[in-house]
Amino acid sequence: MAAEKLKSSDLRKGCGLKSIKFKTTAEVPPLEGMLGQERAVRATEYGLRIKRPGYNIFMTGLTGTGKSSYAQSIVEKISAEEPVPDDWVYVYNFEKPGEPIALNLPAGQGAVFRSRIEELLEDLKQDIPKVFEGDDYEQQKSAYVKDYQEARAEHLDELNKYAQEKGFALKRTSSGFVTIPLQEGEQIDEDEYAKLDQETKDEMEKKSNEVQIKAMEIMRRVQKQEKELKEQLKELDHKFGLDAIGHLFNELMEEYADYPAVKDYLEAFREDVLSNLSDFRSDDDEQQNPMFWLQQQSQDQSDRRYKVNLLVDNRDTEGAPMVYETNPSYYNLVGRVEYENRFGTVVTDFTMIKPGALHRANGGYLVLQARDLLTSLQSWEVLKRVLRTNEIRIENISEHFGLVAMSTLRPQPIPLNIKVVLIGNPFIYQLLYQYDEDFRKLFKIKSDFDSEMDCENDNVTKMASFISYHCNNQDLRHFDREAVAEIIEYSTRLAEKQNKLSTRFNKIVDLLFEADAWAELEDKELVEREHVEKAMEEMVYRSNKYEQKILESIEEEEILLDLEGKKVGQINALSVLDQGDYRFGRPSRITASTYLGRKGIINIERESELSGKIHSKGVLILNGYLGMRYGSLVPLNLTASLCFEQSYGGVEGDSASAAELFCLLSSLADVPLRQDLAITGSINQKGDVQPVGGINHKIEGFYMACKAKGLNGGQGVIIPEKSRKSLMLKREVVEAVENGQFNIYTIKTVDEGLELLSGLQAGELTEEGVFPEKSFNEKVLDKLHYFNDVINRENNIKGQANGVSGDNA
């Protein structure tokens, strides 16, 4: 077989206007659903429908394939069909104030419950003071106080009489009673007491002790009656307080009888109010107190325990919630307990508990970007924890690291029912799958987005619907049929396959925007082909500065590149330079030197640490090919060096291995190769030429170099036969081929390439074990035989010299 010269019709697949049945995209219904992602759509819909633990979804695929937009659209669609989840509120825990209680109520009832509690609190502040300001309360209270005072007076009279009988008067002090001796009914002072004889003093001391004992007994009775009074007043307050508030709480408990947790809270609420009735009773004298403002703040803080913190409010939600969290930090996911400064002290309470994305999405769906999640401190770990435990627990992140030890709230965990959709690239998916044992248990559904789809009439029509959708949604001008055809051809070029369309929709949308802008500048009603072409040209022009610099260097011969004639051990290879936003092809000179030795092939790029692993592998394959082709006929006693000339950066990939082999064989055979041809392709050890990527950029790069130095009609590129279906060349290159100014050839084997490059017959090995006379392979074999003969002669001479030396010895 010989190399095949391609026709211009082989170099680009046009989008025939016959397949486009409309005049403009205004006639095309907008796209509904996802385009070209049947596998991903099927997996995603199944994952969203199955309601089992661990069946969360990881959407993987290249950037720009529509993962994020599809995730939001499909989740919104499915969530709309599902019931609205409950509201969640946090309330004060009267038994354990540091552990607020979480209550759930039907959607919309959380706000109603909060309003009912606010109304209740206002009613309490109005009704309780009225009761305690009434005559009934004052009369009963006065009766209890009067009874106590009368009883206390009786006890004190009894004590005074007893003291007088013993010859003492009593004086009340802060620490109790002091006995003062009497003489003839009059109190005596210390000087008079000192003049008394010892017997009289001892008698007075004895009686004083008896009076003190009696005083202690009397005071115990008084204290007991005082305690009874307090209990009576407390019971009285409780009775009147219950009469004032009982009906208010009874109404609420009847209203929420179907919610046991709410009913328990209301009962605890009522008991706390009855225990703190003084907080609700007005005191006119308080406002005259200079510390009234401080007391007022204290009262406000006391009132806060009766508030309701509406954490999740689903009253306006339709269907299950869908939350797309763009900043999935730890606190944005699980919520937080906020703090405030009060008089120089940092404090908090349950009203400062704030929800996270997990709270808002509870009962529905949460969509996250995997990269954002993994790069945020502790976010991935906390997401795994809540999915394992099925509950949301709000904690301070510093506690996990022991950074800050401070008293804080521990809100009651909230049960979690959620479906998480993670969006990431294949690298992140494989990384998590291989190294995180929890990942495969928690994300059992893989939704894999393809970067291409079949170029068939149905998908072409859908592509037009895709364009129509963006025209309507983004307020763009509609595209005529020729502009649509140009965009479809652009999509095929992005896919690098003539029978495929790209699903990198972000690039296509960018082209739509820019083409619309050029149509606007020309004041056109429709976007036409010329506007699309102009947009593509400008997109290239913004990024191709480095490419132009290289072409200038080639034209000015700063980069050495022969584009005519023949040279031994020299060939033009093709590579692709990727700047991220722009890729272009660059021709490079490869040279080879072969000489006698036993080191085999020396990869200069590898020796200088500029060779990537795949490139080094490609060079090693050359050894395998030489051994397969010639090693069975003659020992391979040679040393060869291969080099990318004027290459000062790294070299990676095996697409230059065919060029390296041809260059090496040219040096061995002393046969010159055509310099007006460049080649790309990888080879295997059997001599087959294998397909490579970036084929369009490589051909166009060499074409631009030839154009810069002048096209002569003989120049061209050799590519693998298997890469011909990837051709989607620019129209300029296609026209040059059609006009005979440029050529493109395909080869399947090394021999086909040798014949095209050298003009000699490659030569097949005969049954006698020789190659045809004057064939390329015969010349290679002759050189190898020559190297082997030289080695043998040297070995014989050394052997004879060693023999003579041995005899002399």
Image: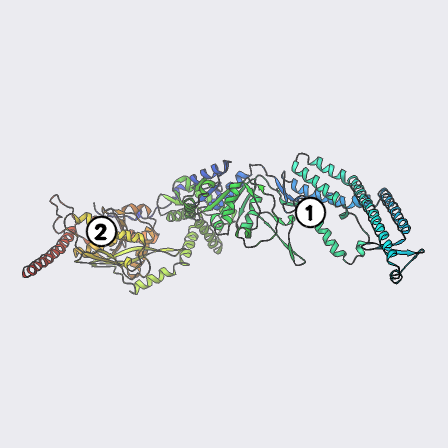
Image disc number at residue 305 = 1
The percent position of residue 806, horizontal first and vertical second, equals 7, 59
From this viewpoint, is residue 650 visible? yes
Q: With 527 as the anchor, is 554 left or right in this view?
A: left
The percent position of residue 294, horizontal first and vertical second, equals 74, 56
According to the picture, the residue beneath numbered tag 2 turns out to be 623
In the foreground, 332 or 686:
332
The percent position of residue 566, horizontal first and vertical second, equals 20, 58
The percent position of residue 616, horizontal first and vertical second, equals 28, 53
Image disc number at residue 411 = none
Q: Earlier in the sequence, mark 1 or mark 2?
A: 1
In the foreground, 84 or 280:
280
Compute the Cα span from label 1 to label 2. Answer: 82 Å
Q: Residues within 10 Å of mark 1 (few under 14, many from 20)?
A: some
Observer-side mark, 1 or 2, equals 1
Tag 2 secondary structure: helix
Q: Residues within 10 Å of mark 2 (few under 14, many from 20)?
A: some
From this viewpoint, is residue 762 visible? no
Kindly identify the amino acid type of the residue bearing the numbered disc 1. Arg
Q: With 301 as the anchor, is 126 left or right in this view?
A: right
